[in-house]
Image (spheres, rainbow, N blue to C red):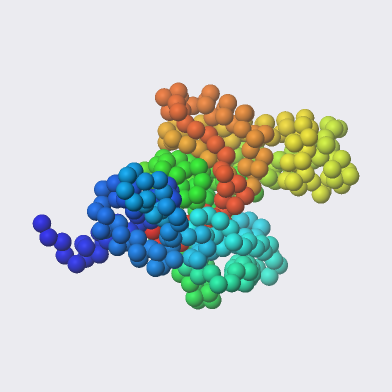
Amino acid sequence: MGYNTGDKQLIKEINKASIFQVVHDIGPISRADIAKILKLTSATVSSNMAELIDEGIVKEIGTGVSSGGRKPVLVTISDSSVCFLGVDIHKDGAEAAVVSLTGRILAIAEQPFQHETGNFEHDVLACIRAVRGMVQGVEVKSIGIGMHGIVDTTKSISVFAPAMALRNFDLKTFIEREEHLPVYIDNDANAMALGESWFGQAKQVKNYVFLNVGRGIGSGIVLNGEVFRGSRYAAGEIGHIRVVDNGIQCVCGKYGCLDTVATEYTVIRDTISAIHTGIKSEAARLVSGNLGAINIDTILKAAASGDDCVLDILNKTGRYIGVALSYMINILNPEMIILGGSMSRLGEYMMDSLQEAAISLSMKECSDGVKIVLSTLRGNAGVVGAATLGMRNLFPRA
Ligand SMILES: [Zn+2]
């Protein structure tokens, strides 16, 4: 059987990406062990490894334990010579970070949107330039953007971003023209989900859901190792599952959605209204009675001090999320559910009620063995996930 030149090139790229993935996920490792795991010849591993080392992506570090004969040289991912920029765009602003191939954040910057100018793309650009200015002597390969709202990843456009009232906006072309780097764009929760498979809880996990709970609530669904986007790129809108009958109106126009009862805003709103009804809370003391100053840090401090008012609200929030997750579990039968986003800082106070609702309301056969965990990337899941959009373009995962 013969291969034409095109096939040979493709096979070489697959081998190189597979070698990279093994070093990334289980390194430091010897060339011989990589060859064993991937069932490749030592010559194939050596020639691809030479390229990865030349490109500054992999480096040799010391020697491992010998199994008789010479001690093998170990290779690992180089931490800082090749980096990727990740931008997380949420309702109120942008956050950008330079991230190494080991997931380390070399620099991070934030830029709130100046809504009065309406030029959100210039705020995003300012954020990118600020963070690039913080790192010297580092090669930034690409810019990945995790964008709030619905993103058409085939055309690379933001189809609908409700917070900025944008429709069919081409942010990619603008940033590429300004920064002269390749730009990759996806929905923020999808980017976060991918970040988990590179650096977080979902390494080697093929079927999982990432839940982004912050100013809004969305999810990234990964099935058989691929993001499931739906027919119009709108899959995973868990925030718009109805969890309250006769509830209040949501930004989507419907009533009683999860988004109206389980976000940063709703936890702050419910704390303030509980205090207004006369319930005592540590949150009020922390802001010296200026209830308008209560933010998510206040909530965290109050929860950590054992404040019953805040703990009750977080317990209820966890239960609402669990109700919506029970639908996901019945439909998708996932291996893992990862709770991330800014609200995951409060995860330990929501987890019990969330797990209880998710498991008790779903069918046993669907929920058996599902792991519900907190993202280890926590508040950085957005920028790290966005950076992996560029990484996976260079090294597609098998
Ligand atoms: Zn809704």
Q: Which residue: 59% across, 61% down?
A: 106
Q: Position of residue 348 (x, y in %)?
A: 65, 35
The quarter holding residue 118 reads bottom right
Q: Position of residue 238 (x, y in %)?
A: 53, 42
Looking at the rendered image, the quarter that the N terminus falls into is bottom left
Q: How many discs mark residues in the rendered view? A: 0
Residue 243 at least partly seen: no
Q: Which residue: 68% across, 45% down?
A: 264
Q: Is residue 272 left or right of residue 216?
A: right
Residue 95 at least partly seen: yes
Q: Residue furthest left?
A: 1
Q: Position of residue 222 (x, y in %)?
A: 43, 45
Q: Is residue 44 left or right of residue 137?
A: left
Q: Is residue 15 left or right of residue 214?
A: left
Looking at the image, which is closer to me, 187 or 29?
29
Q: Which residue: 60% across, 69% down?
A: 135
Q: Which residue: 47% across, 43% down?
A: 202
Q: Position of residue 68 (x, y in %)?
A: 32, 44
Looking at the image, which is closer to me, 29 or 253?
29
